[in-house]
Amino acid sequence: MIFQAPKGTFDWMPPRSESVLAIRDALAAPVRRAGYSYIETPIFEDTRLFQRGVGESTDIVTKEMYTFQSKGGQSLTLRPEGTASVMRAVLEHGLYGGPLPIKLWYSGSYFRYERPQAGRYRHFSQVGAEALGAQDPAIDAELIVLALDGYASLGLRRVRLLLNSLGCRECRPGYRAALQEFLRGLDLDEATRHRVEINPLRVLDDKREEVRAQLTDAPLVIDHLCGACKAFHEEVRGLLSAAGVSYIDEPKLVRGLDYYTRTTFEFVHDGLGAQSSVGGGGRYDGLSEMIGGPPLPGVGWALGVDRTVLAMEAEGLLSERPTRVDVFAVPLGDEARRRIFPLVTGLRRAGLAVDMAFGGRSVKGAMKAADRSGARYAVILGERDLEAGAAQIKDMTTGEQTAVPLAEVVDVLKGRLS
Ligand code: AMP
């Protein structure tokens, strides 16, 4: 029996896996240039962190967590998202006592027991960034611009920014009550009616047509914002416009996590079908207190690496080119292998990307491997070359071949490839 990856998970295999690495780097590069430092937290945490931090009434906590008992009897959960862990680490290490804002970025695996479909997996990968300790609209705008710069650096042209504000603890309760009153008057199934009572904002996010059709006249949070939230939101919008960023006001945008306040945003791509969100985030000024910390405002985002790969494929931006090396070494015979091995090592130590033919192949097989490697040059060492103390350097584009003394191969190739 050959095992298969568990349902809802998959392997990134070459050559696509190379794109995954490049995409992670590209999404992180803008925040790294903007003063965000790298943080790495454990893949599992105390279950209560997510229950409190993500919210008891969310789909993530009620249905999607991978929760298990440790051998010591503690309830642990594979992280379903990154923000709660980052906040936990900041509180645990007392970083909030130092200079603010604390700007952090991360990259890793996340786990949600979701119904698998294209673009929605049970194990997925995100690059995230969080800025803690500043209630400044400029930092909301900064994060949004940096995410968009990451997408743009990959050549993506069809990422749109949806923007909303969810208010704060002053104005949200009034809105929540108004929304609940409206929703109670609708024709909804039992589960949705229950949701109206515990988390009415999430009903706005319902994807079913029969529900959406009834939501056209739902009260909008934007009409219920207090003066401070309104001013904050206007400031964020102004800063985005000043940075040349266009956005779509989406007054029904809510997100699947309970901790969001004020600025809320999502990056969507139109080439992905139902799972159109490539990234999202927002402000979460109450999260620290929800998990037992002092008041510590924050804002952040998480960008889905897997969906960014799909978005790039949808825009035709990923080529299926194999990994390229500069040089491919071809030893013909055992003695040649013994001599070419230190040469390959020397070339690599000189900074060149080098591979060689393994497994005692025929000349034809080895040259085919050289071709497939994408190398600019092949270094061929046969018996006659050994006697002459030279190797053949073949230009794989022109087919031109020259004999070069073994001792000079590294310098010659370095020169030709620089
Ligand atoms: P969230 O943490 O739900 O705000 O998600 C942020 C981003 O992570 C989304 O925009 C997606 O790109 C990605 N993401 C979330 N859940 C999944 C999943 N189950 N499979 C793949 N990507 C996901």
Image (cartoon, rainbow, N blue to C red):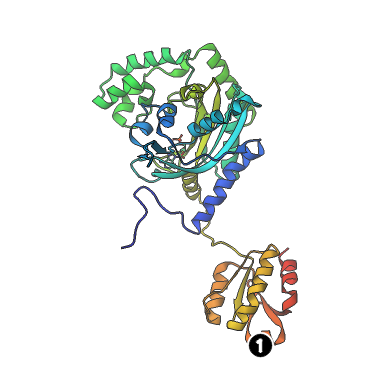
Quadrant field for ligand 1: top left
Q: Is residue 404 left or right of residue 332?
A: right
Which quadrant of the rendered structure holds the N terminus? bottom left
> Which sits in the foreground, 323 or 96?
96
Could you say which quadrant of the image residue 11 lies in? bottom left
Could you say which quadrant of the image residue 99 lies in? top right
Q: Position of residue 323 (x, y in %)?
A: 56, 61
Q: Is residue 203 left or right of residue 290?
A: left
Question: For the residue labelled by badge 1, is the local secondary structure a helix, a strand or a loop?
Answer: helix
**Residue at 60% in and 44% down:** 153
Q: What's under tag 1, amino acid-wise? A: Arg
Quick check: can you spot residue 317?
no
**Residue at 73% in and 63% down:** 418
Quick check: can you spot residue 34?
yes
Q: Position of residue 120 (x, y in %)?
A: 39, 43
Q: Position of residue 311 (x, y in %)?
A: 48, 45
Could you say which quadrant of the image residue 89 lies in? top right
Farthest-out residue, front? 72
Q: Which residue is mark 1?
A: 384
Q: Position of residue 102 (x, y in %)?
A: 61, 30
Q: Is residue 58 left or right of residue 406?
A: left
> Which sits in the foreground, 335 or 409?
335
Give neighbour class at mark 1: few <14, some 14-19, many 20+ (Cα, 10 Å). few
Vertical relation: 131 (above or below) 135: below
